[in-house]
């Protein structure tokens, strides 16, 4: 059986979710040794496979020449496992990579990204000549599945994603209030836990949103099943993001048949189309700065001012009108899209990239560089 060194976190955050799901599906095809980034945090049902894979890394018998796949930030790729081919799988939200990021990415044998948007930035903006492969990540359709619809007397819009300006949280409430100045049969639910945010800033976000009695804030939950249960109560996902590295929660809601409102920019355009989403068009860019996570940078992200803001308002009202006539409307196209983006498909494509003939892709990269 082919061997692989997987270098990744296993926790409830974005990278950790990707790491766990890749471990589970890759272990069905490959002999995987796991080198853990940070402390592990996983439900009891996954403890055994995680521990078994960690034990293989500790023994390190026959893995020294195996390929290494590191699922981690593009600015922290210097450390690796073994001396086999080294592949990085980063997720980033900015459109201009600084020299530190370029240096780290340039040291790889291959770079794997989830979207054509990210590939274009690496090749055409950063001018990195390392081979780049697009491998979309997936969704667990056994957990995030369309089931019996809970019909409520309110039209529920749900936003998932840690408190950030990048997520459009500075404008989302105003967008909601302009769409529904007096309506009481609407609700905006927020699942915005951000463990990297100070208590002061978290309280500021919470005070701002809870000034409107039609807003409900969800506390952080521990399992994907709990996340899916919350999503099941919503009618529409609202994601006015300035930039995304992928957006797992958006795809999860789509998989459950929920309608989607999202910006037509960055990595989630890999799977968001005008058939499965209401897309907010972007006309201008603005500095990718929020004073917290994005400070001094020449990068830009989508501007939501003006026409995009008004289009978001229109989409909220448009879906609400549709809901009024049918409380159980389903996003059939979203369900179809999610079925194509299984974690098994992700594992198959990763195996092709890591162990397959890469000459065609390398030639393509050379032509585009």
Image: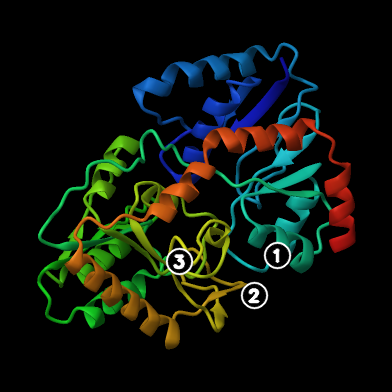
First along the sequence among labels 1 and 2: 1
**Extreme residue toward the bottom, this view:** 306
Circles 1 and 2: CB atoms closer than 8 Å: yes
In this rendering, the answer to whether 163 lies above or below 33 is: below
Residue identified by numbered label 2? 298
Q: Nearer the viewer, mark 3 or mark 2?
A: 2
Q: Is residue 352 left or right of residue 266?
A: right
Badge 1: residue crowd in 10 Å (few <14, some 14–19, many ≥20): some
Q: Is any part of residue 249 visible from this angle?
A: no
First along the sequence among labels 3 and 1: 1
Q: Separation of disc 3 and disc 1 at Cα?
A: 18 Å
Colour mapping used in the image = rainbow
In this rendering, the answer to whether 71 lies above or below 114 is: above
Q: Quadrant of the N terminus?
A: top right
Residue identified by numbered label 1? 98
Q: Separation of disc 1 and disc 2 at Cα?
A: 8 Å
Residue identified by numbered label 3? 292
């Amino acid at each position: 059986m082919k061997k692989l060194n997987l270098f990744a976190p296993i926790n409830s955050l974005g990278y950790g979710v990707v790491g766990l799901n890749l471990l589970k599906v890759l272990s069905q095809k490959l002999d995987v040794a796991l080198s853990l980034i940070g402390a592990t945090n996983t439900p009891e049902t996954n403890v055994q496979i995680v521990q078994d894979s960690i034990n293989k890394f500790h023994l390190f018998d026959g893995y020294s020449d195996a390929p290494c796949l590191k699922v981690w930030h593009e600015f922290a790729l210097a450390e690796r496992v073994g001396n086999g081919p080294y592949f990085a799988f980063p997720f980033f939200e900015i459109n201009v990579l600084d020299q530190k990021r370029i240096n780290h990415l340039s040291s790889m044998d291959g770079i794997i990204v989830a979207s054509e948007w990210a590939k274009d930035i690496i090749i055409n903006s950063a001018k990195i000549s390392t081979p780049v492969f697009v491998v979309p990540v997936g969704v667990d359709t056994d957990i995030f599945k369309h089931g019996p619809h809970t019909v409520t007397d309110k039209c529920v819009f749900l936003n998932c994603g840690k408190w950030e300006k990048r997520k459009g949280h500075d404008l989302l409430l105003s967008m909601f209030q302009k769409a529904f100045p007096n309506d009481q049969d609407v609700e905006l639910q927020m699942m915005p836990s951000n463990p990297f945010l100070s208590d002061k800033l978290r309280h500021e976000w919470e005070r701002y949103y809870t000034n409107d009695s039609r807003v409900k804030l969800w506390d952080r939950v521990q399992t994907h099943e709990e996340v899916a249960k919350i999503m099941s109560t919503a009618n529409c996902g609202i994601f006015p993001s300035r930039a995304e590295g992928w957006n797992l929660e958006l795809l999860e809601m789509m998989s459950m048949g929920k309608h989607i409102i999202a910006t037509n920019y960055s990595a989630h355009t890999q799977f968001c189309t005008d058939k499965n989403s209401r897309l907010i068009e972007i006309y201008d860019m603005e500095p990718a700065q929020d004073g917290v996570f994005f400070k001094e940078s020449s990068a830009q992200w989508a501007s939501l001012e003006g026409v995009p803001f008004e289009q978001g308002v229109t989409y909220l009202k448009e879906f609400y009108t549709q809901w009024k006539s049918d409380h159980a409307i389903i996003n059939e196209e979203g369900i179809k899209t999610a079925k194509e983006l299984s974690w098994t498909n992700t594992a198959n494509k990763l195996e092709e990239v890591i162990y397959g003939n890469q000459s065609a892709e390398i030639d393509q990269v050379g032509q585009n560089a």
